[in-house]
């Protein structure tokens, strides 16, 4: 369990560092990227392109292993259909991202570097998670 927690901590720290270095913890850069018909900032295309290229090249190699290094099995979704819940969730995520300039990972990394915007976003995100859980139970 200690190895698992250490790996999670190191992975999260590396992810947060990457987000900070790429500018994704600055909502102005993210909003500039999303503003394709206004003051468009294409710099995050390189970040997204690097992520897609890395995943495309390495995902199959990783899955060829029998299991992850620190777990018994890979945790992959078995969902194969696009439904209303998926589309609604994606729409809400996109609307929130477009309004705030944050999604959960960069918001947490932004909180770590003292971003004022993240201080407002994190409670709203947590309220949305709680609301989702309450609606799902009903």
Image (tube, rainbow, N blue to C red):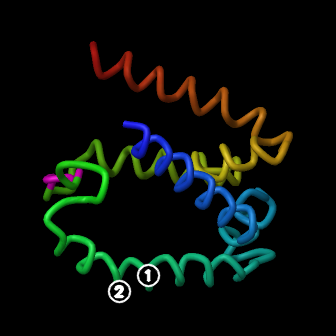
Within the image, what quadrant is residue 48 found in?
bottom right
> Which segment did they paint magenta?
75-79
Quadrant occupied by the N terminus: top left
Q: Are marks 1 and 2 in contact (CB under 8 Å)?
A: yes
> Mark 2, residues whose alpha carbon is within 10 Å: few (<14), some, or many (≥20)?
few
Instruction: Say left or right for 56 vs 127.
Output: left
Write the residue at 23% across / 79% down.
60
Instruction: Say left or right for 13 vs 92.
Output: right
* Structural distance between the alpha carbons of marks 1 and 2: 5 Å
Q: Position of residue 8 (x, y in %)?
A: 48, 47
> Mark 1, residues whose alpha carbon is within 10 Å: few (<14), some, or many (≥20)?
few
Q: Position of residue 75 (x, y in %)?
A: 23, 51
Residue closer to the observer: 60 or 37:
60
Write the residue at 76% across / 33% down.
120
Q: SS at mark 1?
A: helix
Residue closer to the observer: 125 or 112:
112
63 in magenta: no
Name the dominant secondary structure of the magenta segment: loop
Instruction: Say left or right for 128 vs 69.
Output: right
How many marks on residues?
2
Task: Identify the residue under disc 1.
Answer: 54
Q: SS at mark 2?
A: helix
Residue 57, numbered circle = 2
Instruction: Say left or right for 119 vs 124.
Output: right
């Amino acid at each position: 369990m200690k190895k698992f927690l250490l790996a999670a901590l190191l992975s999260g720290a590396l992810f947060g560092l990457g987000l900070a270095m790429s500018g994704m913890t600055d909502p102005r850069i993210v909003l500039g990227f999303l503003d394709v018909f206004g003051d468009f900032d294409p710099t995050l295309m390189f970040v997204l392109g690097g992520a897609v290229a890395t995943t495309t090249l390495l995902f199959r190699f990783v899955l060829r292993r029998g299991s992850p290094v620190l777990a018994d099995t890979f945790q992959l979704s078995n969902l194969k259909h696009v439904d209303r819940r998926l589309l609604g969730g994606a729409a809400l995520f996109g609307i929130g991202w477009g309004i705030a300039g944050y999604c959960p990972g960069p918001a947490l990394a932004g909180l770590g570097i003292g971003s004022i915007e993240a201080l407002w976003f994190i409670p709203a995100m947590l309220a949305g998670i709680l609301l989702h859980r309450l609606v799902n139970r009903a």
